[in-house]
Amino acid sequence: MSPVGRARLPRWGGLLALIVALTLTVAACSSSGGGTSGGAPNGSGERPASSAERAHAALADCPTPSGAVVGDSPLRGLALECLADGKPVDLIAALAGKPALLNLWAYWCGPCAEELPLLQQFSDRASASITVLTVHSDPSTAKGLSRLTGLGIHLPGVADPDTKVRNAVGAPAVLPISVLLRADGTVAKLVVRPFKSVDDIADTVAAELGVRA
């Protein structure tokens, strides 16, 4: 190899390191199938959330079935664990009767942490017309509860360790994602980006669901 060729090696090595770093940054809030998450621990040290941790989080109770008519929803028949009490929730049966926003997130996702307080503020002003439900898309329920507590989030939520919601609606393996549901549980829109403000949420909900808050 010529001296010139040898001199270029460090420069290429530095460029390769930069490309690897950028790739890891982009993947930080990407998740893979089967309940594991890109950029996140994949199961070491996981344990069920305790009743004390659930009580400390002080989350709102999950909705209960209203008896409303359910449409042809891809989420029909899907039952997930309520974060507040650990009990199973028939997702669409519980949500039917009022439009809903399902927010898919994980404790390790930075953009999710920025978006969740906006969703809490939106829900505080719009809860009479739309249900906002968080969907923790990671096996570490205890860490999810701890993250919600730290952010001051009290929205109702469910645990989805196997990313069943994401798979059912055909969403890409990224977070956060918001699934907008009509009152009969059918999917109106997948929002594959984080919301930037409360008004952004309100405008999107108004455009896609006809609900103004």
Image: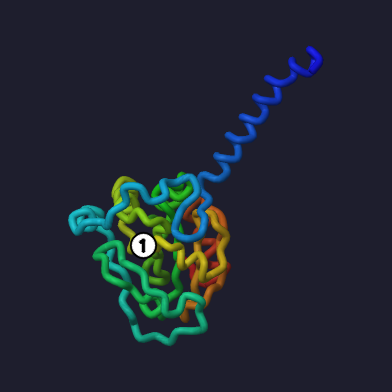
Name the one closer to the observer, 79 or 180. 79
Is 155 situated left or right of 1 in this image?
A: left
Is 144 situated left or right of 55 in this image?
A: right
Q: Which quadrant would residue 16 be assigned to in this image?
A: top right
Q: Dot 1 corresponds to which residue?
A: 159
Locate residue 135, reporting x and y percent. Answer: 41, 62
* Residue at the limit of the structure toward the top, as seen here: 3
Q: Which quadrant would residue 62 be assigned to in this image?
A: bottom left
Name the one closer to the observer, 85 or 205. 85
Give the amino acid at mark 1.
Answer: Ala
Name the one closer to the observer, 161 or 3. 3
Is 194 situated left or right of 47 in this image?
A: right
| Quadrant showing the N terminus | top right
| 198 versus 211 height, above or below | above
Residue at 56% over, 64% down: 171
Locate residue 88, reporting x and y percent. Answer: 30, 72
Residue at 32% over, 67% down: 81
Residue at 67% over, 28% down: 15
| 38 versus 20 height, above or below | below
Q: What element carries label 1?
A: strand
